[in-house]
Image (spheres, rainbow, N blue to C red):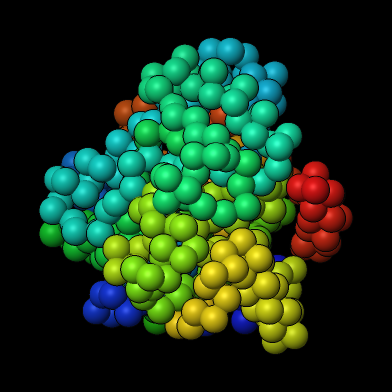
């Protein structure tokens, strides 16, 4: 594999709270060689959703996960099933794809949330869901003015009525903090991502999909009109292949993927359960999933067992020194935002990779110039809903029944400058974002 981060970025990165809430998955390794109709590389939400929907349609499907079940971002994320997937703002989407293209993308965002809700209900997956939509908190007076303006467009774009809460009323809503107002959009919900992941895997296996863990693909090549996927223990020969590796991709699987994605580290801490007195002292009693308006945003929520989850961007490297620095920083920013919890015990801390694209939009579709090869990736830190939805859409496309996709989703990804050195782009981008956050 050719990956652009230090090896530590792809290994266990701290004690993930979600891993404590479900039994370890037990997918077997690939036993030798086999034939299949469709091979899926990557066992996260995209890969599992695609495998499930393919198997339900009677397609023979084999999924290969490089490590243990829930190893990547799907098992380590913040559990926000919400609108998103693109980093491009509405003004950019409107300029690129027109007003109709923007509406199509917004409809896709809503449909993605519905996909997860349907999967949870259909397959009786108990994923500790909560939160009535998502709440965006203004970190500055200027950001609050912008939120109020954006609220006027939400009914037309999403078909729902948002709620605006001024600074004076935040405490009464259980949202006390250094915020200047809040915008709540009643779409989406929070969940335990590892429980959702385990439920998806169980449903896919019951439908007939074959799932293999600890089976990293080391080579992908076309042979006589089919694709061969090599691993250390064997190989899979498939008619069609789906790449669903997102931020954990390799530059050479296939070479087309090189520089078309940019992994970015994100870090999370979780506290010990907060007592009622502690929650009241801070004034945060809401179960809403929330995030602030910074470019380098913070995301946070009160979990069902009264632990508090707080996340933010990670470091630029995965060296021990960089990880120690980001550990200090996330605690500093957490206590600055929630000072009453300064002495609360942090029981879990971990990091993982999200995936940015040069177009600032995800991609779902065929890999140009590679017949029978497809890709679904690039969710910009919002892959719970969009990754699951893209998996379903890709299953339809692979079966030869391509669904209508918004232009923002079907536009092939461009390459980042600097090739394998493209991580260097992050440092100036972070500095610029921090200036906008002032």
Q: Does residue 365 sit above or below 312 in this rendering?
A: above
Is 430 positioned to the left or the right of 163 in the image?
A: right
Q: Does residue 272 sit above or below 249 in this rendering?
A: below
Image point 37% across, 34% down: which residue?
186
| Number of numbered markers | 0
Which residue is more in the foreground, 5 or 403? 5
Q: Does residue 405 sit above or below 269 in this rendering?
A: above
Is 251 positioned to the left or the right of 182 in the image?
A: right
Give x and y (percent) for residue 359: 68, 38
Image point 43% across, 33% down: which residue?
185
Q: Does residue 301 sit above or below 157 in this rendering?
A: below
Image point 57% across, 64% down: which residue?
338
Find the residue positioned furthest to the bottom. Answer: 320
Which residue is more in the foreground, 272 or 373? 272
Using the rendered image of the protein, determine whether residue 123 is visible from the camera's viewpoint. yes
Q: Name which quarter of the figure residue 117 lies in.
A: top left
Is 126 positioned to the left or the right of 152 in the image?
A: left
Which residue is more in the foreground, 318 or 308? 308
Give x and y (percent) for residue 321: 75, 85
Give x and y (percent) for residue 255: 65, 56
Q: Quadrant of the N terminus?
A: bottom right
Give x and y (percent) for residue 132: 33, 41
Using the rendered image of the protein, determine whether residue 406 is visible from the camera's viewpoint. no
Image point 59% across, 68% down: which residue?
339
Is 213 positioned to the left or the right of 85 in the image?
A: left
């Amino acid at each position: 594999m050719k990956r652009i981060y230090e090896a530590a970025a792809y290994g266990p990165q701290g004690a993930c709270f979600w891993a404590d809430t479900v039994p370890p998955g037990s997918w077997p390794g690939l036993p030798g060689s086999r034939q299949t109709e469709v091979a899926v590389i990557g066992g996260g939400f995209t890969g599992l959703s695609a495998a499930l929907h393919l198997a339900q349609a009677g397609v023979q499907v084999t999924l290969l996960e490089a490590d243990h079940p829930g190893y990547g971002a799907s098992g380590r994320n913040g559990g926000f099933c919400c609108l998103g997937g693109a980093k491009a703002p509405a003004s950019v989407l409107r300029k690129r794809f027109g007003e109709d293209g923007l509406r199509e993308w917004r409809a896709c965002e809503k449909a993605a949330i519905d996909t997860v809700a349907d999967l949870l209900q259909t397959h009786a997956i108990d994923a500790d869901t909560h939160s009535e939509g998502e709440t965006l908190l203004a970190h500055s007076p200027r950001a609050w003015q912008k939120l109020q303006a954006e609220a006027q467009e939400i009914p037309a774009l999403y078909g729902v009525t948002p709620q605006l809460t001024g600074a004076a009323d935040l405490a009464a809503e259980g949202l006390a903090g250094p915020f200047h107002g809040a915008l709540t959009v009643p779409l989406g919900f929070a969940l335990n991502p590892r429980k959702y992941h385990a439920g998806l895997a169980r449903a896919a296996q019951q439908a007939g999909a074959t799932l293999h863990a600890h089976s990293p693909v080391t080579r992908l090549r076309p042979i006589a009109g089919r694709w061969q996927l090599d691993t250390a223990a064997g190989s899979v020969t498939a008619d069609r292949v789906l790449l669903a590796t997102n931020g954990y991709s390799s530059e050479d699987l296939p070479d087309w993927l090189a520089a078309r994605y940019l992994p970015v580290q994100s870090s999370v801490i979780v506290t010990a359960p907060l007592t009622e007195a502690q929650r009241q002292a801070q004034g945060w009693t809401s179960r809403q999933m929330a995030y602030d308006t910074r470019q380098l945003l913070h995301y946070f929520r009160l979990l069902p067992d009264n632990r508090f989850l707080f996340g933010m961007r990670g470091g630029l490297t995965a060296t021990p020194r960089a990880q120690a620095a980001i550990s200090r920083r996330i605690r500093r920013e957490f206590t600055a935002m929630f000072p009453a919890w300064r002495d609360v015990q942090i029981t879990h801390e971990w990091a993982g990779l999200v995936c940015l694209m040069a177009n600032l939009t995800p991609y779902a579709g065929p890999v140009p110039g590679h017949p029978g090869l497809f890709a679904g990736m690039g969710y910009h830190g919002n892959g719970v809903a969009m990754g699951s939805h893209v998996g379903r859409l890709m299953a339809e496309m692979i079966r030869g029944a391509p669904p209508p996709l918004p232009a923002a989703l079907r536009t092939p990804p461009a390459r980042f400058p600097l090739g394998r050195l493209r991580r260097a782009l992050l440092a100036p981008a972070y500095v610029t974002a921090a200036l906008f956050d002032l």
